[in-house]
Structures are given as C-alpha cells and as structure tokens.
Amino acid sequence: MHQTLNILLLGRSKQAVTSVTTALAGKHVLSLTTHIMGNGNPSPFETHKPLPDALVLVIDEDWHKYFYGMVESLPAVRPPFLVIGPTLETELLRAAMRAGAREFFTLPLGVDDFVGAVTRIAEEERARSGLSTGHLVTFINAKGGSGASLLAANTALNMVARKSRKTLLVDLDFQFGGLPTYLNMPARNGLIKALELVDTLDEVSLQGHTQKHDSGLHLLAAAMDEVILPEDVGHDRIEKLLLLLDEVYEEVIIDLPLRIDTLTAAALARSDRTVVVAQQSVAHLHNTKRLVFLLKEQLGIPLERLLLVVNRFDKKADIRLRDFVSVLPGLAIKTVPDDYRRVAESINLGVPLAQGAARSALGRRLSALTEIIENRAPVEPPSSTRFLGWLQWHGSERG
C-alpha cells in the first residue's frame, strides 16, 4: 500500500527550494517539509523527527562552495537522498553519485519523473528494511455502469483462490454500493460503524464489522438503510481505517464511487494500482481522459500505477482500442470480452464469475487480469508505429 511520503527539502538557496516546493504543490502523495541550511539555523535533523522517507538536496549555481559540506552534515544513518541541481554538469553529477545520491534531477523539475523516482526509492528502502506494506488496489468507473464493481469482486475472489492470501473487499460507496448483493450476502453497516469507531479499532474488533464470504474473502460495506454523505465522514477517519487495513490484510481491494473527494483521494493516493474501467463509447472515452488527467495531474498518481480496462470489449464497435491508445498515450490498457448473458446470470444469482464461470472465456480473462494486478511491476502500455500512413498496433489486443 502506498503511503503519503514525508520528504525533507534541504537547500542553501531559498529561491531554489521555493521553486521546487511550488512545482510539487498539489501532489498529495508527498508531504513536504523545507529547511534552509546555514545562517545559524539548527541542523534539520534536530528539529525534524522522526527521519523523513527521503531527503532532497536542492542546490544552485554556487553548489561547489557548499555541496560537500552539506553532504557531510547529513547524519550517518539517514534516509535515501536525491539531488536537484541547476544543470547536468559532469562534475556535479559525479559529486552527487560519490556522495551516495540515488537520483539527480535538473531544474525546471520534471514533476512526474521526480514523484515516480522518490516513490520507488522510498518503497525499495521499506522493503529492504522489512517495512513493506500490504497490497492495495482501487477500482473506479470512468463512467457509471462500466463494470468496476464486477471486476473488483472477481479480482478479490481470484486472489483468495490463487494464493489464499488474507484479502478484504471494500465497497466505499455509502449510498449505492452493490457488492453485498453481488456476493449474495446481507447488507450491514460494517463500514459506517468501522469509521465511527476507528479510533478504538484493532485487528480483533475489526472482524466484528466485516462479513466473511464462503470463499474466505472478507467484505466491508455499508447498508442502505440511511443516507450517509461523504462529507459526514472526516478525512482523518478514512486515513486511520486504511492504515489499520494495511496492518491486518495482505490484499485490500476497494471499489470506489465515481467521484473525487477527500475519501476517494485518500484511497487513490495509497493505491499500489488503480484500475480505471471504461466501455467503448465516445462518452466513456471523454470521461476516461478527464479522469486520468485528474488522477495524474491533481492527485500526483504516476501513469505506471494506472491500468485502464476496457470492459465488454467488441472488436467491431465504433470506438476502437486504438482510439483509447491515441487519446491516452503511455497508459497501460487491457480488455475484457463481452458476455452479457453470463454477467447478468452471475449478478442475478449472486454467484460471482470467478466461482460460477471460471473456465469460460470471460472467466479466464478475469483470472489473467488478476495476475496482472497482483504483479506490482508496471504494465507496458500498447505501442503503435506508423508505416506508409497505416497504423500497426502491437500486442495481443488489436482493434
């Protein structure tokens, strides 16, 4: 599970540090603290405790006057650090690498590349020190009714069946969540009660608010007997609940409602992978582009953590796979075939496809999709090359 990373920006130049801080403003995956060194200021490691997840040394054109002293002032036991400098001078790059810098960036800062690098480095450090966390996957529709709930439920069931990992499925739609019905389970206000009592919850008491499916999958959802508004639930409560779920479960799958607010943003920022589900229409294509923009630019989620699934895929549809590739360059895309009869039967009977139709073409594709989602490495986006005016598409899914 991705957690908000605490980053300490160190520098001698207030202007340079401010420029970096401004560039990273709005990236919710990063919590920034700045410290201007020198001028009698105390060591940042005396005033900023505990140590951050990563250090960033921000230097300017006069770096040769103070860089080595800045590095020597760092504590012997320290988090990984990166360097942001004015230019990519060979001497400066060598000095940074000799000092142990993990990455080097130049100004103006490439924000997406920087966020991706610092996230990767912090996670590697956690894994090395044995502090790696559980796996969190969020599903969200690009447009209502695209099938995110169906995919979320079957992915969770496949994870339980494949690896017998302790898995929780969360329906974060307080008003219109349908996962209990899909799993043929009674709706309870477990999610609402868990959020109300989150300050006192532990692993044992949490089980009193979850429901256990016969597959071994745990479900946390809300009943529909009262109106709960998202603004009625404090941001701090969802943060505390996510931290607890991370401690208790190895896999957490969250089905999100189609909105961006403090609750969904908290889950999205912590996700190891976010699966955006769309179908083949102009409206879906436009909504997908808008949603991916919000996730990437406003929430600071890098493209490698996003996966687009085109559900009910039909090669003969007017909107083709290449249209999604053209509008969303660099985004990994997978397809799920159309099988309306089996899906309708599954929902009406409360028997998920992962159990009732696992050997069908749709069931096999859902199993393959689970393998992709379980693999935390980035999925390669589809590529295209233009030859004599014709587009040739590479990969197993064409259209």
Image (cartoon, grey):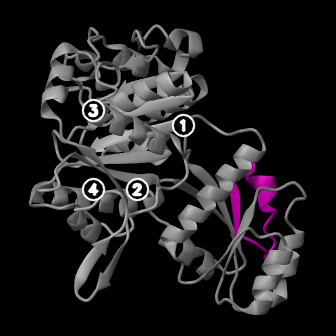
225 on left or right of 89: left
Disc marking residue 291: 4
Whether residue 258 is in magenta: the answer is no
| Quadrant in the picture for the N terminus | top right
Name the residue located 71 percent from the left edge and 45 percent from the top edge: 126
Marks 1 and 4, the one that precedes in the sequence: 1
Distance between mark 4 and mark 3 Cα atoms: 17 Å
| Residue under numbered circle 3 | 149
Marks 1 and 2, the one that precedes in the sequence: 1
- Front one among 366 and 48: 366
| Residue under numbered circle 1 | 135
Residue 103 on image: x %, y %: 69, 71
Q: Residues within 10 Å of mark 3 (few under 14, many from 20)?
A: many
Q: Secondary structure at mark 2?
A: loop
The magenta segment is 35-56
Disc marking residue 299: 2
- In the rendered image of this protein, does residue 139 appear above or below residue 323? above
Residue 294 on image: x %, y %: 32, 59
148 on left or right of 1: left
Name the residue located 46 percent from the left edge and 53 percent from the top edge: 305
Distance between mark 1 and mark 2 Cα atoms: 19 Å
Name the residue located 70 percent from the left edge and 69 percent from the top edge: 82
Q: Secondary structure at mark 3?
A: helix
Count of labels shown?
4
- Front one among 101 and 363: 363
Distance between mark 2 and mark 3 Cα atoms: 22 Å
Nearer to us of marks 1 and 2 is 1
Hey, what amino acid is under mark 3?
Ser
